[in-house]
Structures are given as structure tokens and as C-alpha cells.
């Protein structure tokens, strides 16, 4: 391996890049302001500035929110939905889950394709896959005419029971491609070959909605990076399931990229769990625009086989990540006589007032600067200088409305954003019956380490871990991932009546599909492995739990016991005497990527002692300013202190202390009495 392994996390405010020497394993990070109109420009800028002249790129992976933002801002493609006759209203009527059943503010999610955008054709496949009404492709001519007249950019095809027999979807696709060249076409049996008609339709429409936007972005990025990638090399993209895939695979199923930005940090958390021997972690990523929270339980990321975006269901494997609008760029504002913080963000342009790029509203970063917690001359590794006067002016204007001093207003902004983030963590822990006190809090993102101890105190968590290069930890995590693709099929029946031989054949078929796919991605057979899983539920219930199926001969009784035990852990009870149904079979096809061992960061010589006045608990304290790169393994820093590094600033209050542990990671704990 020659050159560098590179990852890029393209955020709303900053684009973070991590460079790992492919021979030594040593990592460095670099941050540049994002370029929302063309995200690739920030990546190119970072590569030009950070890589040594003439250095090559051995591997490149990145996370993107392009598809996610297209859905959130409703700026995706105009989609025509084609479905079975008499089922035109399935997508518009939606499911029977009202969401918040007692909320008077709940509104039905707005679909991405309306009734006038929905077309039908007279065809029918039975629940067992038999063709009952053949498809007459000539009936599709009305759709062809509508696409040309109305300017549709994409077509979503979702026929009844196509996951059992896709013949009609394939025939419709072939007919439409011949007559509508250049129009993106998405088929439900490719995107989500499983039951639940509304969810499958929603998944198909969302893929079609994001597809043209994601493909344009990837084509642009690949073209602009072509001179940087190794000969025959591929650009890789993070998937929502925590794996990676090539850009060409991402273009085939753009839906898999929707949550590709935030998952890098969770995968980094998995590696951190292995390195530190801490099996249970709460991972929180506070950047410039958003706050992402996820869990590592028993050393593995918490995952799900379905998700919701803007209230619309998606059938795909995802790492469970809870996202709210809270970051360093979150704007503080007045509403109904109270102070609100976020979800509006100043982003990278104009950015917080202290950036001096035209922003005038007070933000969380401005508040931290006012309180002395950020070094105005050493922000983002010294690439930016912050304007203290502008920050104070912005915070003071808001403080005047409430009769508060500038410092008191700044502390209020910090307290409000901390409360919002603590509630987000409670959503994925306490509301699911998980005690956050059993976890360590992993804080990263450019703004995360500055708020970490305050969050831990609100949740009574005893340990905070600030990983290496925390401001670019999501990008760091991307370099620890492998290629992954998920394959599934609906396989319904009572578990006690399932033929193990038939079950083995179905799993083998899914593994064959996975092996073929990974070979096309350039993986060798010796680097390919599989994980088998199945969805189970008690008879009479609606939703399922996904249970791993061990390799080798399937022990049907042992799998059944695993389901009962998992149900008891999830809900506090189980029913071993009830009949159990199997609903879906799943296979995760994994392709191991070669990478060097992670090298410990270099420790530099300690610089001259520094200190400055910093506000803690509403009062100024003389506070030591420490360079993280000068703390050796085992070194301890007692609070009050601020630990600075290129990508983030860690706040250590008076009653806490920090210690650098193996791997260069840093743990914060309360001082012993």
C-alpha cells in the first residue's frame, strides 16, 4: 500500500478530512469550511492544502448528506409513481400509525408524490407470486406521455407483491427505458424486496426522489477527484448501515446514502469500544449544525431494519442515530418572551458572528467565545481567527432584551443547548428502558468536547471519553469500516413448521447474491463473509425483532430461545409457550478492506505554560490552557483546564480531571474526594 487512506465528512459548516499513512498507520486531520453549492470543492481544497505535494491516495471514502438534504428541503426530483390498478391511493392514505396519538399539533406527513403524480396499470401478481393478470405494456403509453408533458425526472414502480415475482416490474422498466432515455427508474423489488405495501412504496418513492440529485453529485465528485484517485481506484461512500460501497454502487441505490454522513462516528465508536474495553458507549457528535446521538451496546452499534424521514417510512438497514438541530452554529433567538436556541443554524456562510463572514445573530460558538472557552487566535487548528468583539456584540444585543449581562446571556445560551442535547440522549436511552449511567459518553465533533461534561452531569454519567482528533472523529471512523451490502427476502411461516433444509437454501441464495455483488465491487473471496439474521414475532403481533442466526447447521430450538431472550431484554417479559412466526430473512454481505494498524499519535514537547480567564458556573476562574499533543499516555490534567487541539477544544471543569489512555484517547472523570 502506498500513499494515504483518506476520508471526508462533509458537514453543514465544516468539511473534515482525515489522512492515514497507508504504511505507518499514523493519522492527521484537517478542517475546511464547507461549500454548500458544490460540496466537492471543499474536499478538493482540503486535499490540496493538507496532503504533501506529490502524495497519492490509496483509498478514499466519504460521507455525504446530499440525498438527505434533498429530502429534508424538498428539493429532490419530480417523481411519477406507477402502481397496480385499484391501489393508487396506498401511498397517499399511508399507514394507520398516527405517530404522536395525543399531540394536537401532529400533521400527516406530506408525500413525495401526490395523487396526480400516481399512475396505474392493470396487472396482478398473487401473494404467492403467481401471475393472475398479465401486464400489457402498451398501457404504459399514458405514463410515457405524462413524463414528456409534465417534466418528471424519475419514475418509481411499485407493483403489488413484486417482491414475490418481479417479472412485471422488469417488463415495465424495459418498456419505459426504451421510450424515456435519461429518466431515472426505481423498482421496488430492487430497493426493498419485503412485505408491507405502504412502507415498500414509500421506500421506492424516496429512492426515486433522491436518485438524480445523488447521481449528479457523485458524478461531479468522481470527475473532480479523478486525478487524485489511484489508477483503477474507486471512490467509496458510507452507507446508512455503517458499511461502505463504491460510488457506482451508490448510484444504483442512492437511498443507501441518506444517513451516510452521521454513521462514521458510530463506526468509530465501535472501534473505540474495542480499543478501550468499554462495551457500552453513548456516542454524541456536535458539529456546527446538528447533534447526532447513537449507542454502542455490547461492542456493537445499535441498528434497525427500518427508519423514518420526515414521517415517511424507509425499509432499509440503518445505524440508529437520533438527530436534532443543535450545534456550534445554532442561533439563539427570542420567541414569546423566551430564549430559544436552534434548530436554525448560521452554517458556514455567513456563519456565527465571530467568523466575521457577515453573521450577526448570536450562536453557541459566539457564547463559548464570550465565556473564554475558545481561543480566538487558534480556532480550527489556527486556520481561522475569531472576532471576540463581534461575538460579544451579538450576544449582548440578545441579553439586553432580557436584562442580562453579556456573560450571563452567553451562559444561558449554553445551558439551553445542553438541555436540548441531554433530552436527545434521553430519547435513545431512558425512553427505551436503557439507563445512561451504565454507559460512558463519547463526545466528538468540533463542538462536542466543550459541552461533554455538562451533558454527563445532567445525565449522571460518570465517564466522558474524548477520542483522538475529536473534531474529525466521524471521518476517522469512516477509515475503520468495511464494505457492506444487505440482502433480504420475505419468508413467512410458523417457526416450528419451517423446513431447516429449505431455510438453508434460502440463506445460501441470499449469500450467493451477496458474493456476486461484492465480487463486482472488487472484493476477493477470501475477504468476503456473511452474517445471517431473521425477523421474528409472536403470533398475533405486528412488529418483529431481528435475531442473528449462527453459522453452520441451524439449531431451530436455540434460535427460538434467542428470540425469547431478546424479547425479554427489550420488553421485560417473554412468552416461551406462544407460537413464533418468522417474517423475513436477511444476509449482511461483508467485504473486508485492507488497512494498517492504527498508530498512536505523536506526543510533542510541552509548550510554555499558559492560562486565561474562563467562566465556569457563572464565575471567572484562572484556567490552565493545555495542548493535547503534549500530554503523554497516562498524563493527567486537573480542572479547571481547557485542552486545545487542532480540531476541537475540551472543557475540564474544576471538579473533573482528564487522563490520556492507550491509543491517545482521553477520559474525563470526576475528581476523587
Image (cartoon, helix red, strand yellow):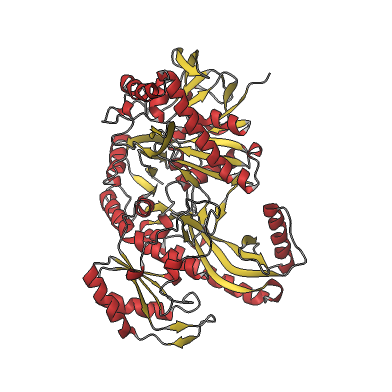
Instruction: Locate residue 379, reporting x and y percent.
Output: 37, 26
User: Above or below — where is 295 with respect to 374?
Assistant: below
Instruction: Locate residue 211, reporting x and y percent.
Output: 34, 61
Q: Residue at x 49, y 15 (%)?
A: 624
User: Above or below — where is 622 with respect to 208?
Assistant: above
User: Above or below — where is 73 with respect to 665?
Assistant: below
Q: Is residue 29 left or right of residue 537?
A: left
Q: Is residue 491 left or right of residue 91?
A: right
Q: Quadrant of the C terminus?
A: top right
Q: Residue at x 33, y 26 (%)?
A: 354
Asked if residue 267 shows in the view, the reply is yes
State the count of labels. 0
Asked if residue 192 shows in the view, the reply is no
Query: Which of the 4 image quarters holds residue 517?
Result: bottom left
Residue farthest along the right direction in this orientation: 577
Query: Residue 447 versus residue 110: which sits nearer the camera?
Result: 110
Query: Which of the 4 image quarters holds residue 23?
Result: top left
Q: Residue at x 73, y 62 (%)?
A: 561
Amino acid at each position: 500500500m502506498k500513499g494515504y487512506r483518506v476520508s471526508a465528512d462533509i458537514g453543514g459548516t465544516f468539511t473534515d478530512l482525515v489522512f492515514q499513512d497507508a504504511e505507518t498507520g499514523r493519522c492527521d486531520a484537517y478542517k475546511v469550511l464547507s461549500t454548500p453549492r458544490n460540496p466537492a470543492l471543499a474536499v478538493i481544497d482540503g486535499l490540496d492544502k493538507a496532503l504533501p505535494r506529490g502524495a497519492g491516495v490509496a483509498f478514499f471514502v466519504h460521507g455525504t448528506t446530499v440525498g438527505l438534504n434533498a429530502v429534508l428541503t424538498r428539493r429532490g426530483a419530480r417523481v411519477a409513481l406507477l402502481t397496480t390498478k385499484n391501489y393508487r391511493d396506498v401511498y397517499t392514505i399511508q399507514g394507520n400509525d398516527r405517530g404522536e396519538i395525543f399531540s394536537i399539533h401532529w400533521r400527516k406527513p406530506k408525500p413525495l408524490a401526490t395523487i396526480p403524480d400516481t399512475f396505474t396499470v392493470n396487472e396482478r401478481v398473487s401473494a404467492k407470486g403467481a401471475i393472475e393478470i398479465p401486464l400489457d405494456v402498451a398501457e404504459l403509453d399514458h405514463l410515457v406521455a405524462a413524463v414528456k408533458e409534465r417534466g418528471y425526472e424519475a419514475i418509481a414502480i411499485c407493483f403489488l407483491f413484486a417482491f414475490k415475482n418481479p417479472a412485471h416490474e422488469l417488463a415495465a422498466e424495459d418498456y419505459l427505458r426504451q421510450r424515456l432515455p435519461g429518466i431515472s427508474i426505481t423498482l421496488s423489488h430492487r430497493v426493498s424486496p419485503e412485505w408491507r405495501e405502504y412502507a415498500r412504496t414509500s421506500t421506492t418513492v424516496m429512492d426515486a426522489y433522491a436518485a438524480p440529485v445523488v447521481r449528479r453529485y457523485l458524478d461531479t465528485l468522481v470527475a473532480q477527484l479523478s486525478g487524485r484517485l489511484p489508477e483503477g481506484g474507486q471512490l467509496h461512500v458510507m452507507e446508512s448501515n455503517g458499511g461502505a460501497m463504491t460510488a457506482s454502487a451508490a448510484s444504483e441505490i442512492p437511498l443507501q446514502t441518506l444517513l451516510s454522513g452521521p454513521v462514521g462516528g458510530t463506526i468509530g465508536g465501535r472501534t473505540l469500544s474495542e480499543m478501550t474495553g468499554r462495551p457500552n458507549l453513548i456516542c454524541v457528535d456536535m458539529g456546527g449544525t446538528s447533534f447526532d446521538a447513537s449507542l454502542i451496546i455490547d461492542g456493537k452499534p445499535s441498528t434497525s431494519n427500518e427508519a423514518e424521514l420526515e414521517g415517511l417510512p424507509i425499509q432499509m438497514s440503518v445505524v440508529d442515530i437520533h438527530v436534532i438541530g443543535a450545534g456550534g452554529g445554532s442561533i439563539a433567538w427570542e420567541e414569546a418572551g423566551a430564549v430559544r436556541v436552534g434548530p436554525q443554524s448560521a452554517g458556514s456562510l455567513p456563519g456565527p458572528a465571530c467568523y466575521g463572514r457577515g453573521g450577526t445573530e448570536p450562536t453557541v460558538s459566539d457564547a463559548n467565545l464570550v465565556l473564554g472557552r475558545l481561543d480566538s487566535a487558534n480556532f480550527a487548528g489556527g486556520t481561522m481567527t475569531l472576532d471576540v468583539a463581534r461575538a460579544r456584540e451579538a450576544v449582548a444585543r440578545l441579553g439586553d432584551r432580557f436584562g442580562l449581562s453579556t456573560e450571563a446571556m452567553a451562559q444561558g445560551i449554553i445551558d439551553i443547548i445542553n438541555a436540548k442535547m441531554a433530552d436527545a440522549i434521553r430519547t435513545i436511552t431512558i425512553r427505551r428502558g436503557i439507563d445512561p449511567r451504565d454507559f460512558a459518553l463519547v463526545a466528538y465533533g468540533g463542538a462536542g468536547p466543550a459541552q461533554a461534561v455538562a451533558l454527563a452531569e445532567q445525565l449522571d454519567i460518570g465517564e466522558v471519553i474524548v477520542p483522538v482528533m475529536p473534531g474529525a472523529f466521524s471521518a476517522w471512523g469512516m477509515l475503520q469500516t468495511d464494505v457492506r451490502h444487505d440482502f433480504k427476502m420475505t419468508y413467512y411461516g410458523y417457526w416450528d413448521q419451517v423446513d431447516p433444509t429449505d431455510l438453508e437454501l434460502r440463506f445460501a441464495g441470499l449469500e450467493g447474491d451477496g458474493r456476486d455483488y461484492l465480487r463486482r465491487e472488487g472484493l476477493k473471496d477470501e475477504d468476503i463473509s456473511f452474517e445471517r439474521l431473521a425477523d421474528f414475532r409472536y403470533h398475533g403481533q405486528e412488529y418483529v425483532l431481528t435475531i442473528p442466526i449462527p453459522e453452520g447447521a441451524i439449531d431451530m430450538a436455540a434460535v427460538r430461545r434467542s428470540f425469547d431472550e431478546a424479547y425479554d431484554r427489550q420488553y421485560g417479559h417473554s412468552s416461551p409457550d406462544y407460537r413464533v412466526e418468522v417474517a423475513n430473512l436477511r444476509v449482511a454481505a461483508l467485504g473486508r478492506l485492507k488497512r494498517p494498524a492504527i498508530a498512536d499519535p505523536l506526543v510533542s514537547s510541552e509548550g510554555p505554560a499558559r492560562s486565561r480567564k474562563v467562566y465556569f458556573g457563572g464565575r471567572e476562574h484562572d484556567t490552565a490552557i493545555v495542548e493535547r499533543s503534549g500530554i503523554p499516555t497516562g498524563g493527567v490534567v486537573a480542572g479547571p483546564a481547557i485542552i486545545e487541539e487542532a480540531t476541537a477544544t475540551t472543557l475540564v471543569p474544576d471538579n473533573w480531571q482528564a487522563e490520556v489512555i492507550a491509543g491517545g484517547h482521553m477520559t474525563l472523570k470526576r475528581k476523587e474526594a
